[in-house]
Image: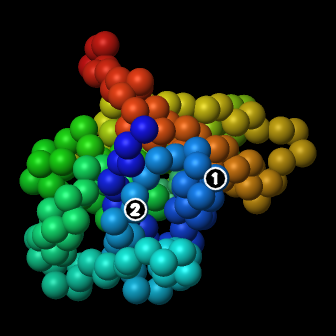
Amino acid sequence: MSFSKMAVLISGRGSNLAALLEHQHKGDLYVDIAFVGSDNPEAKGLEIASSAGIKTILLPYERGKVFAENCLIEALEKHEVEWIVLAGFMRILSSRFVERFYGKTVNIHPALLPAFPGAHGIEEAWNYGVKVTGVTVHLVDAGVDSGPILAQEPVRVLEDDTLATLEKRIHQTEHELYWRTLRDLFAGTLKPRKRRTL
Ligand code: GRF
């Protein structure tokens, strides 16, 4: 089994990054993480990356999206990265970027898409009063959380849940679903499929 070379992009806490690292160390996921990129210098996930000995890169969004994405592209090319894994990355990538790396950029979202896309998927599902929500892993396209779905896992909303307990179970579900989906995608056993209808 050969190692897949990937970069992880984060903006915050980095619990999904930590879960991927855990499964890499366990030998579940054959990956070489070239670098962890962040638009946010305060992201906790950067400490997780550094303490695992992984190179970190700050994406200079304060100089504009085009400049920041050009820095990212340069790093991806320099390190010959094959897969770009978004794990709580809060920036919308431009269509120029997305088209260039289409099929190779993956995201995880804490709701059952196409329901509750955007930055507040857990809270919006909770406020709506759904009985089932969940987690989606999908390819990134030029829209917001709209690319082809690779995997989904439902999470039931329990009678005695609070937003906090629901959030906890969703994150636990993410931490299990992401590495499994990436493993299958990288191995070629999971084939992305287009929507049957629009
Ligand atoms: C996760 O809920 C992920 O689905 C969403 O952003 C959150 C990131 O959490 N895209 P963390 O930084 O991995 O802890």
Q: Residue at x 28, y 21 (%)?
A: 194
In the figure, 124 relative to 93: above or below?
above
Asked if the beta carbon under badge 2 is closer than 8 A to the nearest atom of ligand 1, the reply is: no
Horizontal and vertical percent position of residue 84: 31, 54
Q: What's the residue type where badge 1 is placed?
A: Lys
Task: State the residue lying farthest toward the front.
Answer: 1
Mark 1, Cα crowd under 10 Å, few <14 / some 14-19 / many 20+, is: few
The label on residue 132 is none
- Name the secondary structure under disc 1: helix
Q: Which residue is mark 1?
A: 26
Q: Is residue 178 visible?
A: yes
Closer to the eye: label 1 or 2 = 1
Q: Depth check: give the residue in front, 170 or 15.
A: 15
Task: State the residue lying farthest toward the top.
Answer: 196
**Quarter where residue 54 is shown:** bottom left
Q: What's the residue type where badge 2 is placed?
A: Ile
First reached walking from the N terminus: tag 1 or tag 2: 1
Q: Residue at x 47, y 47 (%)?
A: 30
- Name the secondary structure under disc 2: strand
Mark 2, Cα crowd under 10 Å, few <14 / some 14-19 / many 20+, is: many
Q: Which residue is mark 2?
A: 33
Q: CA distance from mark 1 to mark 2?
A: 15 Å
Q: Is residue 145 visible?
A: no
Asked if the beta carbon under badge 1 is closer than 8 A to the nearest atom of ligand 1, the reply is: no
Dot 1 and dot 2 residues touching (CB under 8 Å): no
